[in-house]
Amino acid sequence: MTIILSALGKSMVSRKLRQLLIFGGVSLFCILIIYGLLIYSASRKSGELETTGYPVYISNLLVSGNEVLMLRTRDKSSIPREYDVYRVGQDGQEQYVQPYPGRAAHWNKDSGKLYFLSEMEICEFDPITGQVQSYSLEQAYEKICAVEEEYVFLQQELYGPVGMYLMTTGKESMLGASGWVLDVYDGHLLTWDVYKNCLTCYSYNKNLIVWEIDLSESFSSAPVLCVNNGDLYLANRVMGNICVIPQFKEKSEIEKLEISAHVIGMVDAYDYVIYAMKDGQAVSFHALFSDGTNKKLTEWEEVNYYQDSSLIMAVHEGKLYCALKTEGDLFCYDLKE
């Protein structure tokens, strides 16, 4: 009888011990989960958004009136991404202005306004006042490819024919231009044939091709473009050289400059052109003058620039502003130094 009672006592103690161990293990597991959630929440509040998979980056730099503005993505997982407008001060400090209602943005250099499509309408957004004006379209388009003065250029498909909408009259028409619209300058569309590697200058007012240049031997991809004082500069991202077409609206004689540089961006700085090139772990900026000479201005150190990154540049009142579309930092440089 004593042996039986002793065995029962040991069994009860063992069962209680097992229950205690199980309860302790479950409690420890719950504590670890709560602790992990607290760390995750703290990292989001501290601004470490890259770890969540939804990084905040700069999408556009633009000049509107007398101000430099930028579009910055929001720190949320919405698809497509949502944007906010920020004002950039002379010291490079940012100031929140208002939300941007569009999903893509095309800057009108003449008016300083932004344009985007919303179903069968062109929307004109004033980044200073926040006002939106809509223009109805007769047919649907896939995207806006360029904007200049009162003209909006659209395409129904990638690299397809280009349509033109005149905002003052509401007139909508199709042009003879097609391909990848690289930019628009003073009444001329510059398009790139991705299959033939040809650059075309198209006058949209006269609705005719001014010239077409076969660049297949020297350019394997679309060039980086910049117009300064009527001269069109072409930079080769891969082969590392810069060419110029003097007074490109009148002729198509291309000249190769004696500059070896893998250019990733160019911008008009009024008296000269500024081009950027990858330099190790930095991006260096150089001035290119009309006589073909150049000099180094400054460099942006420790930049995470990748091959598919897109460098955006703007010049306003003697200052250079730069950003990468895959990063959240803004670089400013005083050109008067």
Image (cartoon, grey):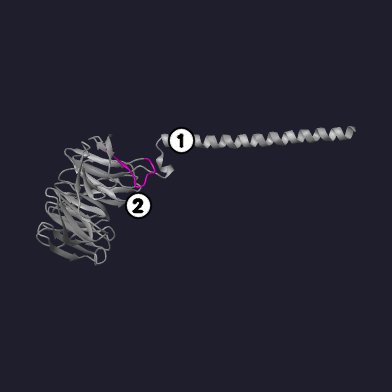
User: Residue 194: which quarter of the image?
Assistant: bottom left
Quarter of the figure with the C terminus: top left
In front of the other: 297 or 129: 129
In front of the other: 318 or 224: 224
Q: Are marks 2 and 1 in contact (CB under 8 Å)?
A: no
Percent position (x, y) of residue 58?
A: 30, 43
The local crowd at label 1, few if under 14, some if 14 to 19, many if 20 or more residues have their Cα within 10 Å, is few
Percent position (x, y) of residue 120?
A: 24, 50
Question: What segment carries the magenta color?
Answer: 75-85
To which residue does mark 2 refer? Answer: 306
Assess whether residue 11 is covered by the magenta stretch: no
Percent position (x, y) of residue 326?
A: 34, 47
To which residue does mark 1 refer? Answer: 41
- At horizontal 18% and vertical 61% (from top left) the residue drawn is 177
Compared to residue 26, the image places residue 190 above or below, namely below
User: Residue 307: which quarter of the image?
Assistant: bottom left
Percent position (x, y) of residue 128?
A: 21, 37
Give the foreground label among 2 and 1. 1
